[in-house]
Image: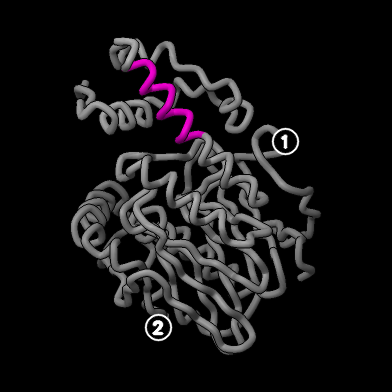
C-alpha cells in the first residue's frame, strides 16, 4: 500500500488523504472508519464516533519479524483490527501497547495476548488497571455480554517507568510517559525516524476530552513536553490525524478554560453561572460544538481551582 493512502474498510479501495484535518477543515467524517498507511509499515485506524461511538483510534507498526499494536480498544474492535493487520502482514503480533487504562483503549488486551502478544503500559498506570480498569471491565461484562462474554481482564504484564524503546534496526518506537495528563499513566508512542506521534488521549482532535481522571494543570505541562519532540504528524487517540500544531490547539483549550473559569470564580460567579456564561468561540471552530456543552470538563476544572466538586444530580 502506498504511504499516505487510505484503505476503505469494506472493500480495501484506495482514497487519497486530503491533508491535515480538523472539524474546521470541513471534511471530518465522524461516521467513517478509515485505515491509512502513514509511512511504510506504519498504520493508523481512525474509528467512527457517530452515530455510535465504537472506540479509540489505533495504530500498528510492522517491524522486521513482528507487529506492535498501539491501543487494544474494545474487544470487538480488537477483532476488527486483527483482521486488518492480517491484510497488511502475516507477521506475529508481539506487543500491544495501552496508552492508558480506559476500556476503549485497553479492554481488548485479551484478544492480543491470546495470540501470544505482551501487553505494555506505563508504570504509573498500574494502579489504575488494578482498580478502575478492572471495575470498568466487569461492568461492561454485565452490560455487553455478547461482546465481553467469558473474556478475562487482561492487564499489561510489562510496565515501564518513563521510557521503553522497541528497536530492531528497521523500526524504532519509543514509548514515553511524560506525566499526569488525561490519566496519571498516559504514555505515547513516538516514531523518531518517521516523526509520527501516537498520542492516545493526551492529545485528541475534536471534542473528545474527558477530564475525570485528569489533572489539567499537569496536562498542560505534558503537552509542553510533547511539543519539544520534532513531530511531523500527530495520530491522536480520537479524531483525524493532524500536524504538530494540534498540540498547541489542545494546550490552548486547557489554558484558556482554566483562565476563564478562574476569572469567573474571582468575579464571584457560581458554577451554574459559569456553565451558562463561559465562551471560547474558537473552540467551536475546532471541535464543531460549543464549549458550554462540555459540562464535565467545566465541572472538573472548577473543582481543581476551588476544591468544590459539583453536586451530582
- Seen from the viewer's position, the closer of residues 103 and 10 is 103
**Marks 1 & 2, CB-CB < 8 Å contact:** no
Q: Position of residue 13 (x, y in %)?
A: 77, 59
Q: Is residue 123 positioned above or below 134 on the image?
A: below
Residue beneath label 2, please?
Answer: 116
Q: Position of residue 181 (x, y in %)?
A: 38, 49
- Residue at 56% x, 88% y: name it: 168
Element under disc 1: helix
- Residue at 63% x, 79% y: name it: 89
- Residue at 40% x, 46% y: name it: 219
Q: Is residue 313 positioned above or below 159 on the image?
A: above
Q: Which residues are magenta?
A: 253-265
- Seen from the viewer's position, the closer of residues 208 and 253 is 253
- Seen from the viewer's position, the closer of residues 289 and 282 is 282
Answer whether residue 269 is magenta in the image: no
Figure quadrant of residue 161: bottom left
Amino acid at each position: 500500500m502506498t504511504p499516505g493512502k487510505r484503505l476503505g474498510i469494506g472493500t480495501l479501495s484506495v482514497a487519497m488523504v486530503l491533508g491535515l484535518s480538523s472539524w474546521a477543515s470541513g471534511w471530518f467524517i465522524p461516521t467513517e472508519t478509515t485505515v491509512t498507511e502513514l509511512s511504510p509499515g506504519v498504520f493508523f485506524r481512525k474509528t467512527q464516533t457517530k452515530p455510535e461511538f465504537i472506540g479509540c483510534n489505533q495504530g500498528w507498526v510492522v517491524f522486521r519479524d513482528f507487529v506492535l499494536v498501539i491501543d487494544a480498544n474494545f474487544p470487538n474492535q480488537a477483532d476488527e483490527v486483527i483482521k486488518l493487520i492480517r491484510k497488511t502482514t502475516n507477521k506475529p503480533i508481539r506487543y500491544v501497547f495501552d496508552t492508558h487504562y480506559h476500556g476503549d483503549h485497553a479492554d481488548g488486551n485479551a484478544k492480543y495476548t491470546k495470540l501470544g502478544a505482551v501487553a505494555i503500559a506505563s508504570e504509573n498506570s498500574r494502579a489504575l488497571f488494578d482498580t478502575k480498569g478492572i471495575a470498568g471491565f466487569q461492568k461492561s461484562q454485565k452490560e455487553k455480554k455478547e461482546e465481553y462474554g467469558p473474556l478475562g481482564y487482561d492487564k499489561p504484564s510489562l510496565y515501564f517507568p518513563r521510557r521503553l524503546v522497541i528497536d530492531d534496526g528497521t523500526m524504532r518506537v519509543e514509548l514515553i510517559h511524560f506525566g499526569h495528563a488525561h490519566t496519571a499513566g498516559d504514555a505515547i508512542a513516538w516514531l523518531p525516524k518517521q516523526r509520527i506521534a501516537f498520542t492516545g488521549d493526551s492529545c485528541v482532535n475534536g471534542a473528545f476530552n474527558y477530564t475525570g481522571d485528569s489533572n489539567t494543570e499537569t496536562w498542560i505541562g505534558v503537552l509542553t513536553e510533547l511539543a519539544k519532540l520534532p513531530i511531523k504528524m500527530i495520530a491522536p487517540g480520537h479524531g483525524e490525524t493532524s500536524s504538530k500544531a494540534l498540540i498547541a490547539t489542545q494546550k490552548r483549550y486547557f489554558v484558556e478554560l482554566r483562565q476563564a473559569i478562574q476569572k469567573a470564580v474571582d468575579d464571584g460567579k457560581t458554577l451554574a453561572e459559569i456553565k451558562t456564561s463561559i465562551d471560547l468561540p474558537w473552540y467551536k471552530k475546532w471541535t464543531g460544538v460549543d464549549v458550554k456543552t462540555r459540562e464535565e470538563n467545566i465541572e472538573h476544572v472548577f473543582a481543581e481551582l476551588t476544591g468544590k466538586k459539583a453536586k451530582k444530580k
